[in-house]
């Protein structure tokens, strides 16, 4: 597995390191710590070439900033216990979003880890512009880190609480396989399926006075719930191969809202879900449910692309 952890000097980036320490990557994985130094443009900067002393100062300052970034990554490397993975570090100049996406493409990464907000993050926004940009444009899975919610889940997968939100899509199956791949045997996993409210047709049948119509509507709802239970059981079999404690959950409501509520209720450390559901547009990178959960969940979120 190829993992890129995009870091700046914010506390959200440091939270990403803490989360990565809790996950057990497959043997042979390559984890790259990436720090993108934003290019500073100077009005009339081309004229520096005609002023040797100013140009020398400018180049010297760039070298100093680059060296500081390298030392920062060295400190971050010291916090990561690589175990059975190879750990690399990379500093590059560029715009944060395009720099991250460029590295993901060149490395053919399977996963990118980003903090929910960077140094310039505004407190009222739950997702920063760079994180949102990575979520919307990266072709690999995206893990958005929001730091730890509980003291009991600081250093290892032991006690880690995961909420796996599933439906009948291939993306949900891919999400379940990620839980298995990360070998979270000591974690608690809640597998949640949300049964959406009846459509207009079924709702109208329920309001009719004729008993037969109501019976048909109620039967349709039972079938939908039964299918939901089957989905949860199918995903449980995938996840249970690695031995974590699994709790099945079936709720009614609107998917994004219920997933966020479940994350709060279970005090989840991490929500895992597919990038698109069964109704997702084929050409779209991200569905509306995964986008809302990534923006508003109270904990870290892993959006899996199959």
Image: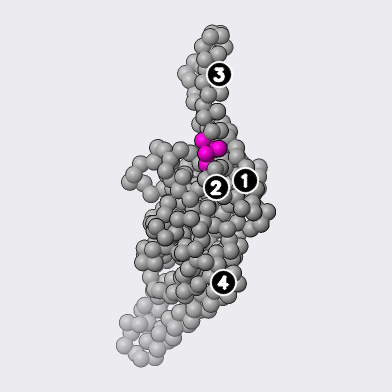
- Residue in view at x 48 percent, y 81 percent: 226
- Residue designated by label 2: 80
In-front residue for pair 67/180: 67
Q: Nearer the viewer, mark 4 or mark 3?
A: 4
For numbered disc 4, what is the local secondary structure? Answer: loop
- Residue designated by label 1: 87
Q: Is residue 220 visible?
A: no
Separation of residues labelled 1 and 3 (CA atoms): 30 Å
**Image location (x, y in percent) of residue 87:** 62, 45
- Residue in view at x 52 percent, y 53 percent: 21
Separation of residues labelled 2 and 1 (CA atoms): 9 Å
**Image location (x, y in percent) of residue 160:** 47, 62
Dots 2 and 1: beta carbons under 8 Å?
yes
Q: Quadrant of the N terminus?
A: bottom right
Precedes in sequence: disc 1 or disc 3: 3
- Residue in view at x 45 percent, y 55 percent: 154
Few, some or many residues within 10 Å of mark 3 (<14, 14–19, 20+): few
Residue 74 forms part of the magenta stretch: yes
Precedes in sequence: disc 4 or disc 1: 1
- Residue designated by label 4: 243
Label ID, residue 203: none
Q: Residue furthest right?
A: 28
**Image location (x, y in percent) of residue 265:** 36, 66
């Amino acid at each position: 597995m190829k993992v890129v952890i995009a870091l700046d000097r914010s506390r959200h980036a440091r939270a990403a390191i803490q989360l990565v320490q809790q996950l057990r990557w497959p043997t042979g994985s390559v984890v790259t710590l990436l720090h993108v130094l934003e290019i500073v443009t100077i009005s009339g900067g081309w004229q520096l070439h005609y002023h040797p002393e100013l140009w020398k100062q400018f180049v010297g300052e760039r070298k100093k900033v680059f060296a500081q970034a390298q030392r920062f990554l060295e400190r971050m490397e010291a916090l990561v216990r690589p175990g059975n993975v190879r750990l690399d570090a990379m500093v590059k100049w560029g715009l944060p979003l395009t720099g991250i996406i460029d590295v993901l493409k060149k490395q053919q990464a399977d996963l990118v880890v980003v903090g929910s907000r960077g140094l310039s993050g505004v407190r009222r926004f739950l997702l920063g512009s760079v994180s949102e940009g990575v979520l919307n444009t990266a072709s690999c899975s995206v893990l958005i880190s929001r730091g730890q919610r509980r003291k009991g889940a600081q250093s290892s997968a032991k006690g880690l609480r995961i909420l796996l939100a599933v439906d009948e899509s291939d993306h949900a199956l891919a999400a379940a396989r990620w839980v298995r791949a990360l070998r979270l045997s000591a974690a608690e996993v809640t597998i949640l399926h949300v049964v959406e409210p009846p459509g207009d047709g079924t709702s109208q049948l329920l309001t009719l006075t004729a008993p037969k119509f109501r019976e048909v509507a109620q039967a349709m709802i039972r079938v939908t719930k039964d299918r939901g239970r089957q989905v949860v059981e199918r995903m449980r079999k995938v996840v249970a191969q690695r031995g974590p404690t699994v709790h099945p959950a079936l709720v009614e409501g609107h998917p994004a809202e219920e997933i966020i509520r479940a994350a709060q209720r279970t005090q989840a450390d991490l929500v895992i879900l597919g990038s698109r559901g069964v109704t997702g547009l084929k050409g779209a990178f991200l569905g509306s449910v995964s986008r809302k959960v990534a923006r508003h969940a109270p904990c870290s979120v892993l959006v899996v692309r199959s």
